[in-house]
Amino acid sequence: IQSNIDGTYQFNLKPGTYTLEVSYISFQTKRITAVVVRENQATRLDVVLKAASNALQQVVVTGSFKKESIAGLYAQQQNRAFLSDGISAEQIRATPDKHLGETLKRITGVSTTDNRKVVIRGIAERYNVSLLNGSTLPSTSVQQRDFEFNLIPTNLVENVVVSKSITADMPYGFAGGMVQITTKSVPNQNFLSFSAGTSFNSETTGKDFMGYGRGKYDYLGFDDGSRDHFPDGLIDLGGYDPRLSDTQNKIKAAQVAEQNKRIGGTERLGTRIYQAMPSQNYQFTIGRSYALDTNRNKKFGFVGSVSYRNTQSNDNIASMRRGNWSKEPVRADDLDDINTGNIYGFNTTLGVLLNGGFKTTNHQVNVYNLYTRIFDNRFARITGWNV
């Protein structure tokens, strides 16, 4: 039995005669015999301990932060040499968020674009760095550096720390901030969840959607090979101008027709008109923990998730260039090279996360895995000159 901080104590015993032993660090242990406990009667026993005569050796107290708790997050924040803010699993559980893209905007100084990409202190995603369990996350965009955080489910996250200043031990290359994500490997309890969502755009969903022929696995983010194996000896048709006659063109119409036939004609390169589907996203997560001894001091476990998202977009574009400035008289609406059109985007994002670990009282060994796949297909139809 442990006493209160002021030394008081109280506990229940069956009637009888007992021997009590009282001890405390740096004091002599006292043993009291023949303590009689009677039924329905309180037995008061005041004990005074004498200081121990022998000197204590060095006492070392060790411990670790509970990274998933609010107190642990704040304790680490106070001890850091840089400015930071963050959110813990304990706080995330109090929100309805399903993926990390929804959660990050709850951190001070952080906002998100479409609940996917992060903006820190007003600085765009390309100027930020993201780490997952200490490793730099690969970019999910071909054109710039960023990461789509909707690929990471919230119930796999232990904590998130956003560093807003830099120290010598951090990776280089960010001006806004660094997002450090720590995920679970051995869950405290088993879980299983599935979520699905959809959205529509009044300018796109259900309307004509142009593009080339789709492969069988485009919706899954994989190419079926139908876009490969173009024949050798193809010529550059950039010099062909359909406005000129055959005698004026360097490349003849027959050459264009022959090359199109070699490639596969309209069956392969001809445009198609589809009906744009609503955006759809699915997420499946699982966590399992197995005790290897009766006291649960040794545990093996894993957490995993599969995330899928498909979006179809239609962007209207228009560009124009001022006409001849030397014309008389000059008119403000005298325009040249007016181009209009649409860019149709078909995007599939697939993400798989799988972590496993072995945990004892004093040690833990973890394995982290993350796989992402982005399939981005864009088709532009532009009408005008000098496209």
Image (cartoon, rainbow, N blue to C red):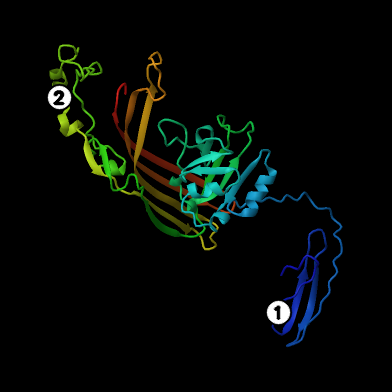
Point 34% across, 41% down: residue: 313
- Which residue occupies the foreground of this view, 33 or 267? 267
Numbered-mark total: 2
Q: Which of the 4 image quarters holds residue 164?
A: top right
Point 78% across, 65% down: residue: 5
Residue 145: x percent and y percent?
A: 47, 32
| 22 to 145, vertically: above or below | below
Point 40% across, 18% down: residue: 330
Q: In the visual, does 189 lie left or right of 264?
A: right
| 317 to 234, vertically: above or below | below
Q: Which of the 4 image quarters holds residue 36?
A: bottom right
The quadrant the C terminus occupies is top left
Q: In the visual, does 53 lie left or right of 355?
A: right
Distance, label 2 to label 1, CA atoms, is 94 Å
The quadrant the N terminus occupies is bottom right
Mark 1 secondary-structure assignment: loop
Q: Which mark is residue 12?
A: 1
Determine which residue is flagged by label 2: 262
Q: Amino acid at mark 1?
A: Asn
Q: Earlier in the sequence, mark 2 or mark 1?
A: 1
Residue 118: x percent and y percent?
A: 51, 41
Q: Amino acid at mark 2?
A: Arg
Mark 2 secondary-structure assignment: helix
Residue 246: x percent and y percent?
A: 15, 15
- Which residue occupies the foreground of this view, 48 or 193? 193
